[in-house]
């Protein structure tokens, strides 16, 4: 679905992404983890085509939907109208009944049935994330790029959300790259974890269902991620 | 809570006005302001309407001008920085300083008021809309781009609604400025409106009216401000309502708006052109009993009979010769000594007739004050108004009367209040037929010394002056004008009461208090109204010889060229 080849990008003179390459298969979910400021968000923007890379190639099969770290909810629109916003843009003349139905169904599945006509300012941070997620999933786009999609959503809701998300992705034959700070999110949702540091993908771990269920395997993986973290983002001991 | 504050404020104010009459002179009690508001609401409403129209028109012009400006600022970075610097420069220059220039371009119509005031409003509007368009975070733009939004969609669905609250808060500020803008404009170039009413009522010591006008203006401004807040809070509701309407009828609405726009602009162009070109005559002071004959001549068509379409303009400058020199006026009423001094400087003026044939200039003191005669002036403070070209005269008089220095204080318009509140011991530059009567109605007995008592030879105080070489300085016009003028004065002398009533009817803003002193003043004025439009050569020459000897003028003017109506 997605093919990245030798992506190079620098901010002013500081190199951010240094020859990054990876592929994303159909229905695959990839988690990008790594220390702060390593260029995870930048990489998503380059994939989405918002910023051009200095060199390298991005090849995609299918359209891209990006859920930004800061949710794009227009304050004068209701929750439902915000989810319908992407349908109004581009050449679309009229919003079909099917789009409307799909948006309502998604919001229902996220437990927002009572908030269709609410305005964003009346929602909590977690609810806004859910609306934003619904907005991203509603459109018929094959590649999902999610930037910190689960921040400010409580742990118990997260677990159920992962199930839901996997379901939606499988149903609609989408593939997904998401950025997270929390290794547990990565383990629960992703098929593959890519560790980004010093502008490169320095580690990669495949996640299997067995790993998801086995505590010992998970602990080993955690040790490995912890080690990578302390190696690439050392803190000075006082 | 704040209502309580307001209540105690008003009660305190009322109490101060009741207990100290001196303050009450210049700051009338709230009860009397309210009484004035009610009893003379028709006049206040009339003027408020004019001011309101000016405010709305200037707002409209500012809105029309701001859109292309914002567009240019958004499109070209250089324009945006240039405009912002320009705005700061412009905002630091009081707009009304530019008014004389605008008067020259637009003449004496409402444009002279509306343009500067809309320029004042342009700044907050433009800057706030510009800020509003850039308000959405970059993520929003990215999102729209990623969803293949067109430029128009980005504008209508993102930037426009985001800019709305900014726009309305700018509008709110603009609306508060609009009141001040209209007022200042009226002070400079208005013939009607609350600003003019305020100046007129202040000059005739009718402070209740001044404050009533002021409070009405505040109410209007605050009302518009609240309206701005109302819309600001509901701007997104309105946006939703309008955009849902637009989905269906966008094209129809656009077409309707375009049609409506062209229709109104067409309507505006249809202005009836006066067949007989009006002669604009500016008065020397806000209408007072000196001007009764002019209003009589206008009302009874003495001027129309001579084929003169006379248009009386209220003064907007201390020096009536200034608008004449800058070609804004065809004719002005001026003072004889000042006009002679101006002619010596080489300005081409022609004196074509007269209104008052004796000096009116005098010094006024309170009857119970320390000064009983001009010799007592030593060591006292004298208030004068530099509006009256009096400083040089005052110096001359003082040097003749006393050796000890006298303190001079410029009090501008407020001759009467300065004397009544005892800030000065005497005032100079008053007219003996006006100010003493004003003081009398305020409960002060006054005594005055006319300039002749100080040795100034007699002259004709109020005269009509035209610019040399214009149609109003032509022999034919002068003959017709003088005939009409003399006819008006003769009518006044024969029917003084009728004449006064005609004058009052044409100046409906004058309150009952003003009427009392103006009627008395009119009786005093009657004997000095010009009995003939001709100037006595002997008298003029005597005055000029005296002025030369006192150093008030340095060159002898060519009087037969300056005065068109000279009689040996």
Image: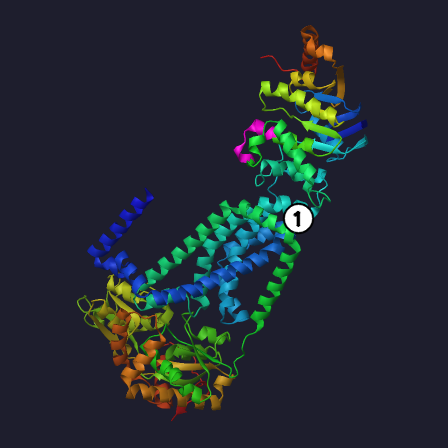
Q: Is residue A184 above or below residue B229?
A: above
Q: Which quarter of the picture shows residue B26?
A: bottom left
Q: Which residue is mark 1?
A: B77
Q: Which residue occupies the foreground of this view, B100 or A153?
A: A153
Q: Residue at x 49, y 68 (%)?
A: B110
Percent of width and height locating residue B530? 33, 86
> Does the magenta-highlighted stretch encompass residue A129?
yes
The C terminus of chain B - image quarter: bottom left
> Does the magenta-highlighted stretch encompass residue A15?
no
Q: Is residue A65 above or below residue B446?
A: above
Percent of width and height locating residue B287? 36, 74
In the image, B548: left or right of B165?
left
Q: Which quarter of the picture shows residue B540?
A: bottom left
Q: Residue at x 66, y 21 (%)?
A: A162
In the image, B554: left or right of B123?
left
Residue that lies at the very extreme toward the bottom in this rendered image: B568
Q: Which quarter of the picture shows residue B237?
A: top right
From this viewpoint, is residue B138 visible? Answer: no
Magenta residues (range): A120-130
Q: Which residue occupies the foreground of this view, B255 or B142?
A: B255
From this viewpoint, is residue B313 visible? Answer: yes
Model colouring: rainbow
Percent of width and height locating residue B325? 49, 75
Residue that lies at the very extreme toward the left in this rendered image: B368
Most prominent secondary structure in the magenta stretch? helix
The N terminus of chain B - image quarter: top left
Q: Residues within 10 Å of mark 1 (few under 14, many from 20)?
A: few
């Amino acid at each position: 679905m997605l093919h990245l080849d030798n992506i190079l990008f620098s901010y002013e003179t500081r190199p951010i992404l240094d020859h990054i390459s990876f592929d994303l298969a159909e229905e695959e979910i990839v988690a990008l983890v790594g220390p702060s400021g390593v260029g995870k968000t930048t990489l998503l923007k380059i994939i989405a085509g918002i910023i051009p890379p200095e060199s390298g190639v991005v090849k995609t099969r299918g359209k891209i939907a990006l859920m930004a770290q800061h949710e794009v909810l227009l304050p004068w629109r209701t929750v439902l109208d915000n989810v319908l916003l992407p349908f109004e843009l581009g050449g679309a003349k009229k919003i079909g009944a099917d789009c409307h139905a799909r948006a309502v169904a998604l919001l229902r599945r996220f437990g927002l049935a009572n908030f269709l006509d609410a305005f964003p300012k009346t929602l909590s941070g977690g609810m806004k994330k859910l609306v934003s997620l619904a907005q991203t999933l509603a459109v018929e786009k094959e590649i999902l790029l999610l930037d910190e999609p689960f921040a400010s959503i409580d742990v118990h809701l997260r677990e159920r959300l992962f199930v839901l998300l996997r379901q939606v992705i499988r149903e609609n034959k989408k593939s997904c790259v998401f950025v997270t700070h929390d290794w547990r999110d990565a383990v629960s949702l992703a098929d593959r974890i890519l560790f980004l540091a010093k502008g490169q993908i320095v580690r990669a771990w495949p996640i299997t269902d067995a790993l998801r269920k086995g505590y010992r395997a998970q602990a080993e993986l955690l040790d490995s991620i912890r080690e990578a973290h302390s190696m690439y983002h050392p803190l000075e001991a006082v | 809570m704040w209502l309580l504050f307001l209540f105690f404020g008003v009660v305190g104010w009322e109490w101060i006005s009741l207990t100290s009459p001196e303050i009450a002179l210049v700051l009338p009690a709230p009860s009397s302001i309210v009484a004035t508001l009610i009893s003379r609401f028709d006049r206040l409403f009339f003027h408020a309407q004019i001011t309101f129209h000016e405010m709305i028109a200037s707002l409209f012009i500012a809105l029309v001008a701001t859109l292309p400006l914002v567009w240019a600022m958004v499109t070209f970075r250089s324009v945006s920085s240039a405009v912002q610097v320009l705005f700061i420069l412009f905002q630091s220059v009081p707009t009304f300083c530019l008014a004389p220039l605008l008067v020259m371009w637009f003449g004496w119509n409402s444009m002279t008021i509306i343009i500067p005031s809309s320029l004042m409003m342009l700044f907050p509007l433009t800057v706030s809309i510009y800020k509003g368009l850039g308000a959405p975070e970059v993520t929003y733009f990215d999102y729209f781009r990623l969803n293949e939004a067109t430029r128009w969609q980005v504008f209508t669905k993102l930037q426009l609604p985001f800019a709305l609250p900014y726009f309305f808060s700018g509008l709110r500020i603009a609306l508060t400025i609009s009141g001040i803008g209209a007022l200042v404009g009226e002070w400079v170039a208005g013939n009607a409106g609350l600003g003019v009413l305020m100046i007129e009522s202040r000059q005739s010591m009718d402070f209740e009216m001044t404050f009533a006008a002021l409070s009405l203006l505040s109410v209007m401004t605050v009302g518009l401000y609240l309206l701005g807040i109302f819309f600001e809070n509901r701007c997104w509701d309105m946006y939703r309502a309008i955009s849902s309407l637009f989905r269906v009828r966008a094209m129809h609405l656009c077409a309707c708006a375009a049609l409506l726009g062209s229709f109104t602009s067409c309507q505006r162009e249809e202005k009836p052109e006066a067949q007989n070109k009006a002669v604009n005559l500016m008065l020397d002071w806000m209408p007072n009993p000196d001007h009764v004959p002019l209003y009589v001549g206008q009302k009874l068509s003495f001027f129309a009979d001579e084929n003169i379409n006379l248009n009386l303009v209220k003064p907007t400058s201390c020096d009536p010769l200034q608008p004449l020199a800058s070609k804004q006026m065809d004719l002005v009423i001026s003072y004889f000594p000042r006009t002679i001094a101006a002619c010596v400087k080489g300005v081409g003026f022609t004196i074509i007739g007269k209104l008052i044939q004796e000096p009116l200039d005098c010094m006024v003191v309170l009857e119970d004050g320390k000064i009983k005669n001009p010799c007592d002036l030593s060591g006292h403070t004298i208030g004068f108004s530099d509006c009256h070209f009096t400083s040089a005269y005052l110096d001359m008089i003082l040097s003749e009367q006393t050796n000890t220095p006298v303190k001079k204080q410029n009090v501008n318009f407020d001759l009467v209040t300065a004397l009544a509140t005892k800030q000065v011991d005497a005032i100079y530059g008053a007219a003996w037929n006006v100010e003493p009567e004003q003081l009398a109605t305020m409960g002060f007995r006054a005594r005055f010394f006319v300039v002749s008592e100080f040795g100034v030879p007699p002259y004709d105080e109020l005269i009509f002056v035209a610019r040399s070489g214009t149609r109003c300085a032509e022999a034919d016009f002068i003959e017709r004008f003088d005939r009409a003028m003399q006819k008006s004065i003769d009518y006044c002398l024969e029917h003084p009461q009728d004449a006064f009533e005609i004058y009052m009817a044409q100046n409906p803003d004058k309150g009952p208090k003003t009427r009392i002193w103006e009627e008395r003043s009119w009786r005093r004025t009657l004997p000095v109204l010009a009995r003939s439009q001709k100037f006595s050569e002997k008298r003029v020459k005597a005055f000029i010889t005296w002025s030369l000897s006192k150093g008030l003028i340095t060159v002898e003017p060519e009087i037969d060229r300056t005065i068109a109506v000279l009689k040996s």
